[in-house]
Amino acid sequence: MSAAPSLSSPPLPIVLPGTRTGRDPERSIPRGPRRAPPEVVAATQRDRLLDGIVRTVALNGYTRARISDICQAAGVTRPVFYEQFKGKEDAFLAAHRHGTSLVIQAMETAFNRAADWPAGIRDGLGALLGILAEAPAFAAMAVVETDAVGPAGRAEREALLARFRRFFGGLPEPHQAVPVEELVDIVVGGVYAAIYRRIAAGRTAELPDLLPTLTFYVLAPFLGTAEAAGHSTDASPQIRRKINTLCAQVP
């Protein structure tokens, strides 16, 4: 996937599951003669349940999240929950897929508007870090709690990481003679691990601070350390010194 300028208008802010409360009066379903059509009611209830599972899992952890707690957070009954989902795992995976798809779309928009591949990587990472920083409940649920779901959760995470490969299409050949696909997977895994550590430590709001370091980390294997450092222009003096030290040590 190659970066190219885009003349489209800026995207609307995305609304991730968990960023709203399911019991918000503005999201209540009208009753009586003015009741909404059944399909609108079902869509609203599902949307509120996605918020409910994200908030409940972020608060209690996946293993301790109960269907009753999810329903209470969403403002719906248990029968309504089972009309939408087979169980807790099904609801978790639905919220994960919906939310991560929105994040990937926002990253792609930022990437495609950039002038070149390095700028696209930086802008895509910036979108990712900024979005997660503003949605701590979703970040905790989608990144930290996935392992607790078991095999289905781990498979979902692997599918998500595979989607990040699209940002490495048409990229420069790496400076070292290594398999490109393997190198890309290692780079993507490293970015994910860095984000995971911040969120697990309760420092989700600080995720944007990782942008200079992660930009350098992603670009260096393909551009070389010197050129990669040039794309980390707003790094703090401390990070800049570390990057410069690394550049001096690596040919």
Image: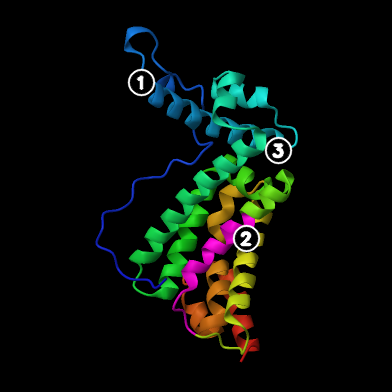
Find the distance from the CA under tag 2 to the CA under tag 3. Answer: 20 Å
Q: Amino acid at mark 1?
A: Pro
- Chain-order first, disc 2 or disc 1: 1
Mark 1 secondary-structure assignment = loop
Percent across and percent down for residue 75 are: 54, 20
Find the distance from the CA under tag 1 to the CA under tag 3. 33 Å
Quadrant of residue 118 within the rendered picture = bottom left
Observer-side mark, 2 or 3, equals: 3
Magenta stretch bounds? 157-172
The residue carrying pointer 2 sits among few (fewer than 14), some (14 to 19) or many (20 or more) residues within 10 Å by Cα, namely few
For badge 3, the amino acid type reads: Tyr
Horizontally, residue 145 falls left or right of residue 231, namely right
What distance separates the C-alpha of mark 2 from that of mark 1? Answer: 42 Å
Q: Residue at coordinates 56% horizontally, 88% vertically from top-left?
A: 175
Residue nearest the observer in this picture, 177 or 206: 177
- Mark 3, residue position: 62
Q: Which residue is mark 2?
A: 192
Q: Is residue 124 left or right of residue 53?
A: left
